[in-house]
Amino acid sequence: MLSDLQRYNPWWSDPGQFQRDPHWRVFQNSRLRWEPALLDQVDFEQDAIYTLRGPRQVGKTTLLKQWIGRLLTRVPDPQAIFYYSCDLLSDRQELFSLLRQYQDICQPRSLPRRYIFLDEVSMLPDWQRAVKAAADLGWTDHTMILATGSSAVDLRRGAEQMPGRRGSPAKLDWLLLPMAFADFLHRTMPELTIPEDGSLDQIREDPSAFAAWRSSWLAFAGSCQLALDQYLKVGGFPQAVESFMQHQRVEESIRQIYSSVVRSDIEKQRRSRNILRNLFTRTVLTEGAPQSWQGLARDAGIGSPNTALDYAEILADSFLLYILYALNRESKTATPRKDKKLYFSDPLIRDAVCGELGLPSSGVDRRVEAAVGLHLIRLYERAPQEGLSLLANVFYWHNSKGREVDFVVRNGPHLIPVEVKYQEQIHAEDSSLIRRSFGGGVLVTKHTCEQSGALTLLPAALFLLLHS
């Protein structure tokens, strides 16, 4: 294993060797060169055990290499920086042996700080027991450890079993999702000199702020709409965006990569591929429509509602889907017993699934609705890194007659209804339900941008650029 340690850490013998790292070279040679905001948010000078979660092929390994590249410019001894891909390991004993070997290498060097990156550690059952044993032996003193994985559940369970050993930073668990629309716009249209993104809360509550924001942004509405049309086809996974920037389309080879990602996330859980296909077929056909686990199981031919729930939660906690539960307005919490809605988390995942199943993909209005929902999750969920299977602040709502509001956000003591009407013309009845039931809210439109009392109408291309 020592040769593996040296192979994965070539900068130990010569820091210049880092430039030959395959992930770093791909990043350096790409047109995209995406640097997520997360790059500047994690404090590596804390003695802490961090986790980084996110779907497979979203760029977690590339982000680790970006962090390592920065560390190499300021850390005196390159052996203080250790990276290993844990998909080469078979069990926690091998992980413990790996940490012991690194400890033996470091022991005579008296390093003031160390930085350990364990990539895809969630592939190992009970990985935390190896890290916990290393911590108990004092091997993590003056050390930052960052562990990555594509399953929120696997990483969360592991992290929860290390109480008191993870350090004291305010935030220990981080999430890397595909590029948001704002990132996509900035990368694919860098020539646009657009104003600073606005605050959804501010422009909703302050008419003068809305007027100022509207006057600044309307000049860019056409370009933003063009970018949104592209984003709804491409999505935010870095390889897909890179393919689009080079070829003006997502190459079929890229779609195949993500089809295999979807399959592997189920297979590593030792679940049935046939059940997965049936569940995905019903999700494609009914995306965004309220349904029960019993109905989904029946229509998909799965048999058991618990099986439907189990598979959907695996996919949501691998960040491939998200599940919306109905809102209980009195408690402002989810009602798991009522019908729920499933959405794909990214257009590329939807298209990869449809290609795998031989199904036509959903229309643009459904894609916009799914994108709006995920944007609200980014803005208002406090812990999306815990998975997208049981959200705490984003729901949908329906009245006693079955009429529904697409999304309702809990923002502190307030509820914000958000209805998507992605159409050429907006009519009075399009906002009647949120006006009558909530007194106002947000209507996400195709073109209309105006404010009428407590109702704010925002084009989707501009709504998706707003922060909270």
Image: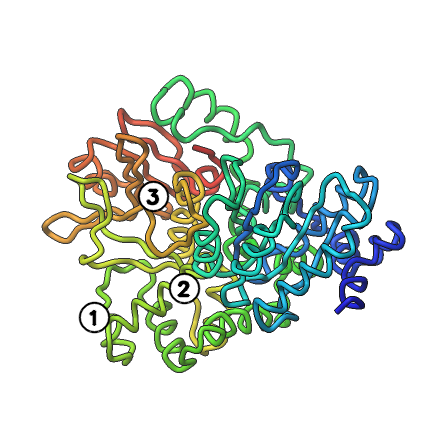
Amino acid carrying mark 3 in the image: Gln
Residue in the image at 36% along x and 79% along y: 275
* Nearer the camera: disc 1 or disc 2: 1
Q: Do callouts 2 and 3 mark residues in contact (Cβ within 8 Å)?
A: no
Vertical order, 3 against 427 (above or below)? below
Q: Secondary structure at mark 2?
A: loop
Residue in the image at 52% along x and 46% along y: 165
Q: Quadrant of the C terminus?
A: top left
Residues at marks 1 and 2, CA–CA distance in whole angstroms: 23 Å
Amino acid carrying mark 2 in the image: Ser
Pointer 1 or 3: first along the chain: 1
Residue in the image at 46% along x and 20% along y: 212
Q: Do callouts 1 and 3 mark residues in contact (Cβ within 8 Å)?
A: no
Amino acid carrying mark 1 in the image: Gln
Residues at marks 1 and 3, CA–CA distance in whole angstroms: 37 Å
Q: Secondary structure at mark 1?
A: helix
Vertical order, 149 against 285 (above or below)? above
Question: Residue 73's spot in the image, x, y percent?
Answer: 81, 40
Q: Quadrant of the N terminus?
A: bottom right
Q: Quadrant of residue 244?
A: bottom right
User: In the visual, does 27 lie left or right of 352?
Assistant: right
Q: Please give the residue where the numbered disc 1 appears in the rendered image.
A: 294
User: In the visual, does 211 lie left or right of 295?
Assistant: right
Question: Residue 346's spot in the image, x, y percent?
Answer: 48, 57
